[in-house]
Amino acid sequence: MKAKITLLSGDGIGPEVVAEAMRVLDFIASKYNHTFEFKERLMGGCSIDKYGSSLTDETLADCQSADAVLLGAVGGPKWDDPAAKDRPERGLLALRKGLGVFANLRPVKVHPALMEWSPLKPEKLQGVDILVVRELTGGLYFGWPKGRDIKDGRERAVDTLEYYDYEIRRVMELAFKLAKGRKKKVTSVDKANVLESSRLWRQIATKVGAENPDVELDHMLVDTASMRLITGPAWMDVIVTENMFGDILTDEASVLAGSMGMLPSASLGESTVGLYEPIHGSAPDIAGKGIANPIGTILSSAMLLRYSLKLADEAADIEKAVEETITNGARTADIGGKLTTRQMADKIIKRM
Ligand code: IPM
Ligand code: MG
């Protein structure tokens, strides 16, 4: 097949890890006779530096017309001024919104050989295989009004947590559909004891649950869920939750896997154009050293093959190679080794 992939390496370690994922995709193209056409574009801090905007209209258009977008990471201390009118993160949010990718899939699996890297006891980690489905284009990140003003002589800041029924329903339906290919269990996480938006969330979760009687549904408050992720993660299958709860819970869940550097994500919407990115950030402390773990990005490229290009065998080929490479003892610094970013990718490619 022929596919167009837009690469947004971004900032910090982004370019280092995206370069390796691109080599993996090139290898897949030659092994399975596909043609992947890559277009590299700037997004985030690097785009602010060059164009004065974290996401230009041209870059967004190049992403919208691609089959898939692979992103590294954005942000860094250079662009952290709270008074700045644009920030790298704004570009990422505008990209998610502009692509309409309302569901962010963040799988968390614990590789047995990496259990010692998690602060949790190995017995808690046995069998952990969670898929967090985070709502990505609504909630506090996008609700209106938002901003700063002076009210009653006081400086005020406002963010709004807003959800429409259809926004909840579409992400919920996807979570149920994904659960059917897994352990058929959905945990819907909300704060329905306090938030109106969570009461609507729970009401719709219950309706979608009734439409899918073969899937078991529970509701859990977000504070309880954050505890359960540590005390009993092996019980969980699919977790579906609103944007900000999902942001926080997935950083917490990543600790189970031993290193954030291992975890991929896929952001999907109505169309097949998906956005794929590791869940880690730009890691400015190690940027430019060539020691970042490329696995989160390489596994994101496997998700790209599976969800946007429908190349399930090719995706499984990458995932199996990563799994075996780790079993065989290959380690970057975040998981206690000395391999460089390039060397880790080389080992994975060799296994394929
Ligand atoms: C993430 C990140 C982003 C988010 C930031 C960089 C805007 O934390 O992808 O989890 O909050 O969504
Ligand atoms: Mg986050």
Image (spheres, grey):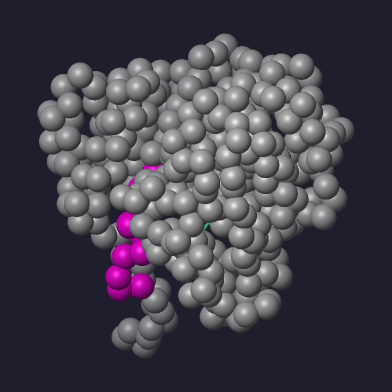
Rendered residue at 60%/25% (across/down): 317
Q: Which range of residues does the magenta coloring cover?
A: 134-146
State left or right for residue 203 relative to residue 278: left
Give residue 137's position: percent from left, percent from top. Answer: 36, 57
What residue lies at 54% left-to-right and 80% top-to-bottom? 85
Figure quadrant of the C terminus: top right
Q: Is residue 315 above or below residue 266?
A: above
Q: Nearer the viewer, residue 177 or 338?
A: 177
Tell me where residue 126 appears, x and y as whole percent.
Answer: 54, 13
Q: Position of residue 61 (x, y in %)?
A: 47, 68
Along the line of sight, which residue is nearer the eye, 199 or 352?
Answer: 352
Say if the magenta span includes residue 143.
yes
Please tell me in which quadrant of the rendered image residue 240 appears.
top left
| Residue positioned 29% across, 43% down in the render | 171
| Residue 294 among those drawn in magenta | no
- Asked whether 80 or 280 is in front, the reply is 280
